[in-house]
Image (cartoon, rainbow, N blue to C red):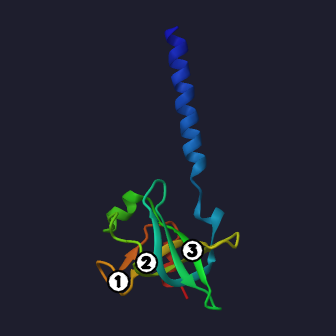
Amino acid sequence: MKKLMILGLLVAATLVGVRTASAHHSFAAEFDRNKPVKLEGVVTKVEWTNPHVWIYFNSKDADGKTVNWGAELGPPHGLQGQGWRRETLKIGDQIVVKGSLAKNGTNRLNASTITLAGTGGRPGQTLDAASSGKETAKDGK
C-alpha cells in the first residue's frame, strides 16, 4: 500500500512538471525578432502572474482607430530584479513599448523595453521588460 501511494505521488509530480514545462514557450515559437515595433498607448490592464507578466494598452493605429494590444514581459521575479514593482504601471499610465510582434498577426508583442511617458510615478524612465526578446530594444522603429 505504501509503495502504491509513493508511486501515485511520483506520477502526480511528474504530470505537474510536464504541464508546467509545456505551458512555457520559447520566444521564437510565438514572436518574430525581425518584426520590431514601437507603440505608444495608455495602460488598460496589468496581469502580474507567472510565468510572464502581461500588460494591455490602447494605441492608435495608422487610421486613428484605437486598438488594444497585449505585451508579454518577463517573469515577476525578473522584473523585480530590474526595479519593477506591482505598482510600477497603473491603468491610465501613458507608455511607449518597444518589442517584437507576434508571428500570428494578432495584437500581441514581446516587450523589450517600456518607457513611462508623461504620467505615472517615474515619467520618462525606460525600464527593461526582462523578456527573452530584449535584443529588439535597440532595433525598435
* The image quarter in which residue 27 lies: bottom right
In the image, 132 versus 59, the foreground residue is 59
The three-letter amino acid code for the residue at tag 1 is Thr
Residue tagged by mark 3? Answer: 69
Q: Secondary structure at mark 2?
A: strand
139 with respect to 124 (left or right): right
Residue tagged by mark 2? Answer: 114
Looking at the image, how many numbered discs can be counted on the residues? 3
Query: Which tag, 3 or 2, sits closer to the chain's start?
Result: 3
- Please, which residue is most extreme toward the right here? 104
93 with respect to 34 (left or right): left
x 59%, y 56%: residue = 25
* The image quarter in which residue 103 lies: bottom right
Where residue 71 sits: x, y (%)? Answer: 53, 70
x 48%, y 59%: residue = 52
* The image quarter in which residue 122 lies: bottom left
The three-letter amino acid code for the residue at tag 2 is Ile
Marks 1 and 2, how far apart at CA: 13 Å
